[in-house]
Image (tube, rainbow, N blue to C red):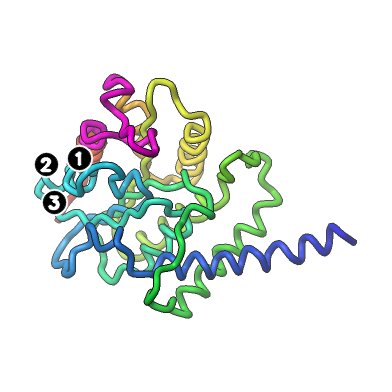
Amino acid sequence: MKRRLLYAVIPLVILFVGAELVTRALRTSKFVQRTRPAVVEGPHLLALGDSWTYGYGVEPEEAWPGKLAQDTGWTVVNLGEPGSHPLVTLARFRSWPHTPSTVIVLTGANPVDTAGAPKAGAPKPNPLQTLALFRVVEQIVARQVQDDDMPAERRGLSKAPIRETLLQLRRMTSDQGAGLLVLTYPLPADSDAEIAQVNSWIRGVCASNEIPVLDLENVNQDLGRDALLYDKGLDLHPSAPGYSRMAEAIAEQLSPARTD
């Protein structure tokens, strides 16, 4: 009886969280205003994700989307936001009004409770977008019981939101005729076990579903911990040289296949 009651309550709780995530994702925040251009014309790349995409600890032009734009001349729109949960990242893509040539996404290292509080005066979520996210959450509820590889991590990370977000992005980019490239997180030499687990989930989901993935886990290790990491807060984030390495690897991956 208690188990049946628990299974009845959990989906309602997750649906409520999903609605809250959409509200947060569609708000007008200082993070989005930092790097989002007022007008986008013509072909562009869309960078999605959390603080690793946003460029925590560096100037906008030093984050990997900014460096990628400088190094290649491509138009790169940075929609990364610190603390963004995978479902928030998905909702942010749904709210983007243009069709990108390629979507680059790095997500999965944040649990639900780091996504930040709604800001005063934030726009109300679109009901259709809310419903769409409800469907994603329902799929997570249906599949989560079947997952044997989702340990209860200390930080509340799990594979299910990563998988559903990447599957939805694959479907939506395919419908739009856009490319999709998924990234893994660069790690220091003394690797963070939880982020390494997230990278393993990302690689597994992409391999099982034929989603292009660029594995950046080791791209920065030779830089050394002091040179690589921003040490004034969240010390796993790359410094400017680390973000630059990421941009170089992404440019090399995209250059042969990219056409405007």
**Spot occupied by residue 46 in the image (x, y as percentages of width and height):** 27, 56
For label 1, the SS is helix
| Side of 19 relative to 238 (left or right) | right
Graded by Cα atoms within 10 Å as few (under 14), some (14 to 19) or many (20 or more), the crowding at tag 2 reads: few
Residues in magenta, as a range = 222-245
Judge whether residue 17 is colored magenta: no
Number of marks in the rendered image: 3
Q: Nearer the viewer, residue 31 or 21?
A: 31
Disc sitting over residue 71 in the figure:
2
Circles 3, 1 touching at the beta carbon (< 8 Å): no
Q: CA distance from mark 2 to mark 3?
A: 8 Å
Graded by Cα atoms within 10 Å as few (under 14), some (14 to 19) or many (20 or more), the crowding at tag 3 reads: some
Circles 2, 3 touching at the beta carbon (< 8 Å): no
- Residue bearing mark 3: 74
For the residue marked with disc 2, what is the amino acid? Asp
Give the quarter of the image for residue 157. top right
> What residue is rendered at 39% in x and 63% in y?
172
Q: Nearer the viewer, residue 120 or 192?
A: 120
* Relative vertical location of residue 85 with respect to residue 39 in this rendering, above or below: above
User: In the displayed image of the protein, which residue is found farthest to the right?
Assistant: 1
Graded by Cα atoms within 10 Å as few (under 14), some (14 to 19) or many (20 or more), the crowding at tag 1 reads: some
Q: CA distance from mark 1 to mark 2?
A: 8 Å
> What residue is rendered at 30% in x and 49% in y?
54
* Relative vertical location of residue 204 with respect to residue 8 in this rendering, above or below: above
| Side of 3 relative to 133 (left or right) | right
Q: CA distance from mark 3 to mark 1?
A: 10 Å
- Residue bearing mark 1: 251
Judge whether residue 223 is colored magenta: yes
For label 2, the SS is helix
> What residue is rendered at 41% in x and 55% in y?
170
Q: Quick one: label 3 or label 1, which is nearer the N terminus?
A: 3
For the residue marked with disc 1, what is the amino acid? Ala
